Image (cartoon, rainbow, N blue to C red):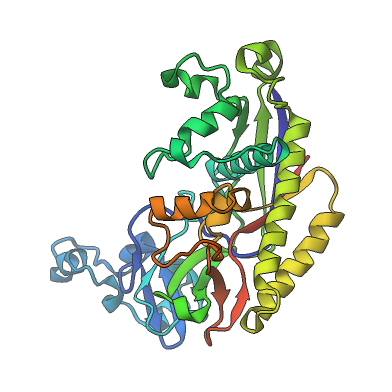
Amino acid sequence: MSVHSLTIETLSPVHIGAGGPDLRRNIDFAIFGKTLYMLNIDAVLEAILPENPNDRYYQQILSTPDVGSFLSEELLRNNPKLYHYQTSEFKPKADILRPVIKHWTHSPYIPGSSLKGALRTAWVRQQYQQHNLNLDVRQLEGKYAAFRKQEARLLSPKAPRPALVPNYDLFRAIQISDSQPSPDNSLTLYNSLVFPASNKGIPIVLEAIKPRITLQARIKFDDYILKTQAKHFGVHEQGFNSEALKQAWRTQGIARIQQELTFWTNRREGEHVQQFFSQLEQQANAAPDNCFFIDIGWGTGWKSKTLGDVIKTPQLSQLIHQYELSRKHNVGDRFPKTRRAVCDLNDHLKRPFGWIKVTLN
């Protein structure tokens, strides 16, 4: 087992959802004036509960869902331990927020599963391009396992029967740890907007890890699978090795940056986002071979999670109609037509979500 450290630097806000209920006003957070406080509920209850459980206020506080009504701005301002963070960058009518996944210490982190999923997608996309493979829409399955059979041909080529596909998956040879919890003051709120405005939808306010936060994780390459059992797994036939993987991750990261730069170029409202991708393209092209750039988590879009531009017309149109991905799609139309981006309080677009730089040490 060869183990390498991964240095992860967030380049834009990263939101990987907690998977639980949304955060609600006066339950999880409180707003006073122009400041939002994300409450530390345990500390709040300790501060406001009477010492005597028989006190009439004791049960009243515990039974109310509106903990925020027992707080004041002065109390919070004078007791920083009562909240995890504060911000003035939020929509005034924010009643519901989407939480990011967090460590038990309330510090956000990047799950290894999110990293591995992004790297797995990049590898599959690279194989389709290198070997000029075509997506066979007729062999796609149900909505939540559509690509399973075709993915198995690439990643489980030696599986003797469908039930054993997971046992022969080449990515069993790669294990990626969760990152360590992020440092203090790395979490805040961001407002998101759909572009273009004609497809605006519902604005969403969510927690995300700030840009320019550095995290550490580990990646393990299982030499038993990659070397001792290489023939058993079809390692050599698929060209599956650490150098080929790094090349795929680097190549596909640059390709994704170029896709987004093309989308945002010459869009007046997206000037700041275009500048972000223009600078990111320069940075990625100049980076050493052990660095790659990937987009993960919420708001990164359909192309980030799929084969993307590998799927050509008319297969793309068939796919869109088969899985009802768009109501008014015609052959040759751009898909997807929209993007999500971070916006300021005046709804000006600022940057995309989810971009990170990964350095394999």
Residue 174 visible in the picture? yes
Position of 77 with respect to 291 (left or right) is: left
Residue 109 visible in the picture? no
Image quarter of the C terminus: top right
Vertical arrangement, residue 172 with respect to residue 291, above or below: above
Residue 86 in picture, x, y percent from top left: 50, 74
Vertical arrangement, residue 182 with respect to residue 49, above or below: above
Residue found 48% across the figure and 42% down from its top: 137
Quarter-wise, where is residue 169 in the image? top right
Image quarter of the N terminus: top right
Residue found 54% across the figure and 68% down from its top: 339
Vertical arrangement, residue 347 with respect to residue 21, above or below: below
Instruction: Depth check: give the residue in front, 239 or 78.
Output: 239
Residue 285 in picture, x, y percent from top left: 83, 55
Instruction: Depth check: give the residue in front, 90 or 120.
Output: 120
Residue 222 in picture, x, y percent from top left: 66, 22
Instruction: Depth check: give the residue in front, 197 or 153.
Output: 153
Position of 48 with respect to 325 (left or right) is: left
Count of numbered circles on the image: 0
Instruction: Depth check: give the residue in front, 255 or 222.
Output: 255
Residue 345 in picture, x, y percent from top left: 52, 84
